[in-house]
């Protein structure tokens, strides 16, 4: 179905509306002829729009357009002799038969609507949390799938918006992008909307445009689906101490307003349900929010697309930047061991200057061993926005360390949107605890966590 095409379900709804409107006009014509006349004119306008929509389906449906043309003629005749009760009743019966015939023909002769599915990512580096779902939808001949990257803002310390960002040009080449200002959500009313940002106004560092908050998106679709942009280490549902460290993910605008929430495993699903129930009861939310049977259907533990992506990305299929190869390759053409070094936002906020000292120590160690080991440093993509907003002085020092690392050129600095490339070419993980750890572990890589106290 072409973008913006009138859907079959909408056209059938229009016929239903016409049936009711014509019946009401015929019954009220004696007592309110002016109102009945205006209603008939509106019906004629709706019929013309409906005929135009049917014509877009091709010549095979010309007979349906002819029914509408005859219907419009009867509307005109009824309006001309509105106070002639005998004529009005006779014409009203003709109209009812015409619309019923049209309705039946549309139901059984016109093709079924394709399912329309829209993906609304905001950061290109988080696209892997939706990609495998999009690929399945895109491959389905009965589905129209749209990828519509949405704008987001950095926030000032007072919560006001700062710079606007749009990353529509950073997605993989095989992903067709539709601009957010060229896709009218309200007009399309897609069957399903997928999101990976759950925070709405509750994130202190960044915010998607308020129009794309989950509490607004739910008005534009039959089903809003939230899939987390992150993946966590597995936790047992009875390990409350571990759960306390992640339970804030379980009760966000995204989990509240979405019709479905897809998480990484069955164990995580049970944790989300339990913690959602607790938080909803504490907040005094009513009805479905505190109904476990409802939540059992709302939360699905069918797995994370991030795992699909990392496991399907093969080193031999990747394009490695030339400047990276200069660091990776030895004189004989063989590759050095590559260590994925990950620094997180939370560790930097927690340890501040001590974390900076740790980073400098790590860089010095790998610099001394650069002939045998290549360091691939990939900081969390929100480090700059977070530190600039919450610790401006810390950001200045961090920036100096980052710029020096890049200028010296002995290691790789990866701030691209392609996390999976970094994982695919690396031989080991070293760094802070984050969702990347689980992905590397699933890939079979050795994992070592850095200790900030050990310099």
Image: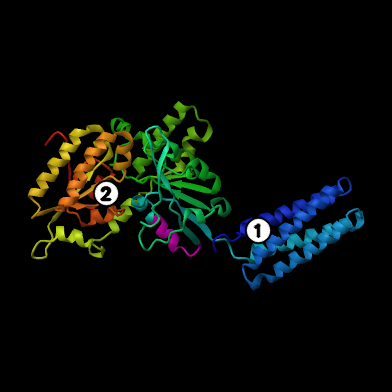
Residue at the (61%, 68%) spot, across then down: 57
Q: Is residue 77 above or below residue 285?
A: below
Q: Nearer the viewer, residue 149 or 403?
A: 403
* Mark 2 crowdedness (10 Å alpha carbons): few <14, some 14-19, many ≥20: many
Q: Can the viewer see residue 369?
A: yes
Start-end of magenta stretch: 132-142
What residue sits 62% from the left and 67% below the top? Answer: 56
Confirm or deny contact between disc 2 and disc 1 (CB under 8 A). no
Taking the image as shown, residue 264 lies to the left or right of residue 287, namely: left
Q: Magenta segment, principal secondary structure?
A: helix
Q: Position of residue 113 (x, y in %)?
A: 57, 61
Residue position marked by numbered label 1 in the rendering? 11
Is residue 402 one of those drawn in magenta? no
On residue 439, the disc is 2
Residue at the image point whose x is 48% and y is 32% from the top: 290
Residue 293 position in % (x across, y down): 48, 38
């Amino acid at each position: 179905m072409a973008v913006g095409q009138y859907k079959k379900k909408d056209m059938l709804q229009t016929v239903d509306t016409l049936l009711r409107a014509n019946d009401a006009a015929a019954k009220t014509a004696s007592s309110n002829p002016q109102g009945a006349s205006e209603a008939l004119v509106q019906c004629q306008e709706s019929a013309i729009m409906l005929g135009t929509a049917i014509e877009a389906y091709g010549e095979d449906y010309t007979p349906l357009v002819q029914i509408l043309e005859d219907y419009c003629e009867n509307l005109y005749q009824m309006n001309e002799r509105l106070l002639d009760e005998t004529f009005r009743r006779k014409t009203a019966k003709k109209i009812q038969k015409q619309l019923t015939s049209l309705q039946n023909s549309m139901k059984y002769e016109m093709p079924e609507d394709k399912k329309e599915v829209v993906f609304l990512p905001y950061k290109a580096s988080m696209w892997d949390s939706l990609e495998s779902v999009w690929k399945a939808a895109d491959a389905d001949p009965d589905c129209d799938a749209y990828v519509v990257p949405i704008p987001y803002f950095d926030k000032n310390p007072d919560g006001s918006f700062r710079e606007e960002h749009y990353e529509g040009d950073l997605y993989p080449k095989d992903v067709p992008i539709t601009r957010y200002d060229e896709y009218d959500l309200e007009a399309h009313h897609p069957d399903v909307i997928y999101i990976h940002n759950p925070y709405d106004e509750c994130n202190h560092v960044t915010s998607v445009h308020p129009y794309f908050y989950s509490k607004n998106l739910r008005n534009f679709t039959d089903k809003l689906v939230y899939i987390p942009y992150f993946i966590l280490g597995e936790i047992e549902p009875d390990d409350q101490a571990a759960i306390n460290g992640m339970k804030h993910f379980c009760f966000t605008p995204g989990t509240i307003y979405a019709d479905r929430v897809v998480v990484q495993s069955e164990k995580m699903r049970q944790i989300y349900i339990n913690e959602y129930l607790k938080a909803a009861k504490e907040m005094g939310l009513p009805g479905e929010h505190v109904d476990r049977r409802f939540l059992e259907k709302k939360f699905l533990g069918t797995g994370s697309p991030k795992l699909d992506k990392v496991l399907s990305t093969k080193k031999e299929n990747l394009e490695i930047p030339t400047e990276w190869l200069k660091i990776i390759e030895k004189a004989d053409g063989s590759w050095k061991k590559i260590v994925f070094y990950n620094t997180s936002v939370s560790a930097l906020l927690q340890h501040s200057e001590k974390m900076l000292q740790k980073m400098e120590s790590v860089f010095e160690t790998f610099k001394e061993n650069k002939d045998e080991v290549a360091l691939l440093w990939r900081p969390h993509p929100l480090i700059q926005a977070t530190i600039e907003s919450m610790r401006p002085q810390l950001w200045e020092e961090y920036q100096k360390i980052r710029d020096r690392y890049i200028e010296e050129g002995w290691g790789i600095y990866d701030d691209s949107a392609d996390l999976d490339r970094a994982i695919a070419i690396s031989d080991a993980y070293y760094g802070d605890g984050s969702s990347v750890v689980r992905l590397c572990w699933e890939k079979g890589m050795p994992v070592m966590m850095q200790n900030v106290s050990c310099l």
